[in-house]
Amino acid sequence: MEKSDSYVICNPNSYQGFMVSIEFGYATYAILHSGGNLKKIYFTNTPLGYDKFNTNPDLSYDVFLENLYHNPLFQNELAYYRKMSNSKDPDFGYTSERDFYDDLQDMYGKVLLLESRGKLVIGIDSLLKKIIYQLQIC
């Protein structure tokens, strides 16, 4: 990853697995704290939970919890939470909805920070334009 210019996260339906979350954390660190080559992260789709916190930055845990189980717009988050709360490995799962909420909120903060510094792009259009441009000048 440190030798790459970009890290692309393919996350259809806003889904990214637990290992991608770990890799995203490492990529965030590499961009913010090292002199490596990694300059930008691309998500093919909106990261899980991003739109929920983006439309309501003050989304409280209680409101999140209510929506998680009763709002169809939270179906991706609920499916992911159920999958990860049933994990057989305690190191790769959630012990409570609060853990899940805190994780999504933390991820949202990292995404905002990287976006504000021009280091993260959601959607592949700009990545495709960059690749086409690079191919044209070669």
Image (spheres, rainbow, N blue to C red):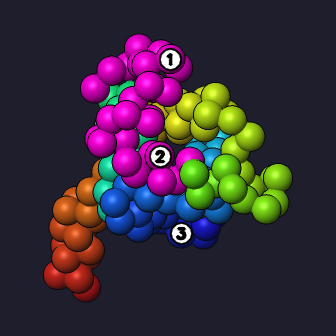
Q: Which mark is residue 78?
A: 2
> Residue lying furthest right in this view?
90
Whether residues under marks 2 and 1 lie with C-beta atoms below 8 angstroms apart, the answer is: no
Residue at 23% across, 82% down: 135
Give the labeled residue for mark 3.
Answer: 4
Q: Earlier in the sequence, mark 2 or mark 3?
A: 3
At x 22%, y 59%, the residue is 126
Q: Position of residue 108 (x, y in %)?
A: 47, 34
User: Looking at this view, is 25 or 132 the one in front?
Assistant: 25
Which amino acid is tagged 3? Ser
Residue 75 drawn above or below residue 106: below
Is residue 95 visible to us here? yes
Residue 13 in the figure: left or right of residue 8: left
Q: Is residue 88 above or below residue 137?
A: above
Q: Within 10 Å of the Cα at label 1, are there few (<14), some (14-19), or many (20+) other Cα atoms?
A: few
- First-in-chain label (2 vs 1): 1
Image coords of residue 116 (percent x, y): 37, 32
Q: Amino acid at mark 2?
A: Leu
**Viewed as shown, does residue 18 lie left or right of 131?**
right
Region in magenta: 55-81
* Amino acid on which disc 1 is placed: Asp
Drawn side of residue 43 relative to residue 18, left or right = left
Can you tell which quarter of the image residue 86 is in?
A: bottom right
In three-dimensional space, the C-alpha distance between marks 3 and 1, rounded to whole angstroms, equals 40 Å
Tell me, yes or no, if residue 137 can be seen here: no
Q: Label 1, on which residue?
A: 62
